[in-house]
């Protein structure tokens, strides 16, 4: 691969030329033996882009960097979001300017669904959308409004 010059962002951190994400700096490590030969490259520092799966190593203090694929053993795994389980107390939720708010269970953005009339589904009345509620598309949670208050309670449906 060719040489690239890494740019700096507003906080003076190097950014990936491919995705624009901030690069993670890793110090050089110990000398290693690979296939019976001494590997001195492991002692050099590198700038890692976890999103693209590559790292950049400076060439002779020139300000230009070689691009290498990141070995699978060094890739960071995306941490799954934690979803709260068990009893969730009533929570006061307020819509923001975009009509959404943060989900108390997973932290993603929930959509607000306004109350509507009773609908007939398969010949039976469906009362599920007759009260204001929030729906989280990420964890599939529903928070229904408690009558006469500004609080919402987590609902299993």
Image (tube, rainbow, N blue to C red):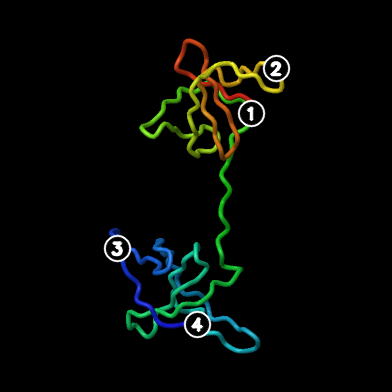
Separation of marks 1 and 2 at Cα, in angstroms: 31 Å
Q: Residue at x 39, y 34 (%)?
A: 98
Residue drawn at x 35%, y 72% as measured from the top left? 6
Q: Which circle's residue, 2 or 3, is located before the other in the chain?
A: 3
Tag 2 residue: 124
Residue position marked by numbered label 1 in the rendering: 86
Number of the front mark, 3 or 4: 3
Q: Quadrant of the C terminus?
A: top right
Q: How many C-alpha atoms fall within 10 Å of the one at disc 3: few (<14), some, or many (≥20)? A: few
Query: Which residue does the numbered mark 4 point to in the structure image?
Result: 41
What is the C-alpha distance between the residues marked 3 and 4? 26 Å
Give how far apart the Cα atoms at labels 2 and 3 are: 61 Å
Q: Quadrant of residue 24?
A: bottom left
Mark 1 and mark 2 in contact? Answer it, CB < 8 Å. Answer: no
C-alpha gap between disc 4 and disc 1: 50 Å
Residue at disc 2, secondary structure: strand
Q: Nearer the viewer, mark 1 or mark 2?
A: 2
Whole-angstrom CA distance, mark 2 to mark 4, is 70 Å
Circle 1 crowding by C-alpha within 10 Å: few under 14, some 14–19, many from 20: few
Name the residue that disc number 3 marks. 12
Find residue 25 and report its horizontal and vertical position in percent.
42, 67
User: What residue is rendered at 54% in x and 31% in y?
Assistant: 135
């Amino acid at each position: 691969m060719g040489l690239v010059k890494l740019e700096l962002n507003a906080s003076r951190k190097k950014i990936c030329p491919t995705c624009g994400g901030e690069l993670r700096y890793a110090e050089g490590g110990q000398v290693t033996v690979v296939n019976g030969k001494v590997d001195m490259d492991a002692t050099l520092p590198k700038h890692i882009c976890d999103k693209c799966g590559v790292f950049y190593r400076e060439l002779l203090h020139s300000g230009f960097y070689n691009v290498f694929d990141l070995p699978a053993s060094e890739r960071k795994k995306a941490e799954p979001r934690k979803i709260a389980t068990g009893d969730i107390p009533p929570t006061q939720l307020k819509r923001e300017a975009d009509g959404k708010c943060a989900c108390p269970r997973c932290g993603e953005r929930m959509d607000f669904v306004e109350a509507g009339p009773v609908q007939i589904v398969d010949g039976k009345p469906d009362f599920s959308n007759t009260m204001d509620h929030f729906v989280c598309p990420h964890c599939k949670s529903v928070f229904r409004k408690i009558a006469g208050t500004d609080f919402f309670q987590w609902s299993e449906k």
